[in-house]
Amino acid sequence: MTILRIRAASFEFAARMEDKLAPLTCSRFRALLPYSQKLIHARWSGEACWIPLGDFRLDVGFENATSYPAPGEILFYPGGYSETEILFTYGPTCFASKLGQLAGNHFLTVVEGREHLQDLGRLVLWQGAQDIVFEMK
């Protein structure tokens, strides 16, 4: 089992890679580590933040895809109907874009620091974009 450390703003989380359920997504994302971006608040999906990736591709299809991730489940949307993105959920979420409902690959699950998910979401909502780093623990 692979555990990643995620640092977002002043918060730290540990997340399990869902290697058995999303093996290709996990493998391709692991090759990017350490991975740094900006986390912004989602516009259509509910209580979630996202990392917009535009035309970036991991060359993966859909695996372990869901439209209704639970808080702490992190999705990778490989693109198609909307731009490529990573969705970081902190509360009730229905993954969507301006084109409608989407499904993304659930490839990471927060296993430590879950008690800070709501705090991170509120910070991003009210204070704007925050730095986020994914790295091996």
Image (spheres, helix red, strand yellow):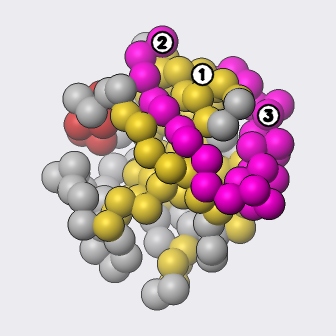
Q: Going 37% across and 76% down the picture, which residue do you hit?
A: 82
How would you rate the neighbour count of disc 2 (Cα within 10 Å): few for under 14, some for 14-19, many for 20 or more? Answer: few
Q: Report the residue that reaches farthest toward the left.
A: 59
User: Is there CB contact under 8 Å for labels 1 and 3?
Assistant: no
User: Label 3 amino acid?
Assistant: His
* Residue behind mark 3: 116
Q: Is residue 104 above or below residue 63?
A: below
- Helix, strand or loop at label 1? It is strand
* Residue behind mark 1: 14
Which image quadrant: the N terminus?
top left
Give the x, y percent position of residue 5: 53, 21
User: Label 2 amino acid?
Assistant: Lys
Q: Is residue 97 left or right of residue 42?
A: left
Q: Earlier in the sequence, mark 1 or mark 3?
A: 1
- Helix, strand or loop at label 2? It is loop
> Residue 113's quadrant in the figure?
top right
Q: Going 48% across and 12% down the picture, which residue do you hit?
A: 137
**Residue 137 image label:** 2
Q: Going 68% across and 59% down the picture, which residue do you hit?
A: 128
Q: Is residue 37 visible?
A: yes
Residue 93 drawn in magenta: no
Q: CA distance from mark 3 to mark 2?
A: 18 Å
Q: Is residue 29 left or right of residue 132?
A: left
Q: CA distance from mark 1 to mark 3?
A: 12 Å
How would you rate the neighbour count of disc 3 (Cα within 10 Å): few for under 14, some for 14-19, many for 20 or more? Answer: some
What are the residue bounds of the magenta stretch? 111-137
User: Is there CB contact under 8 Å for labels 1 and 2?
Assistant: yes
Q: Is residue 90 above or below residue 104?
A: above
User: Label 1 amino acid?
Assistant: Ala
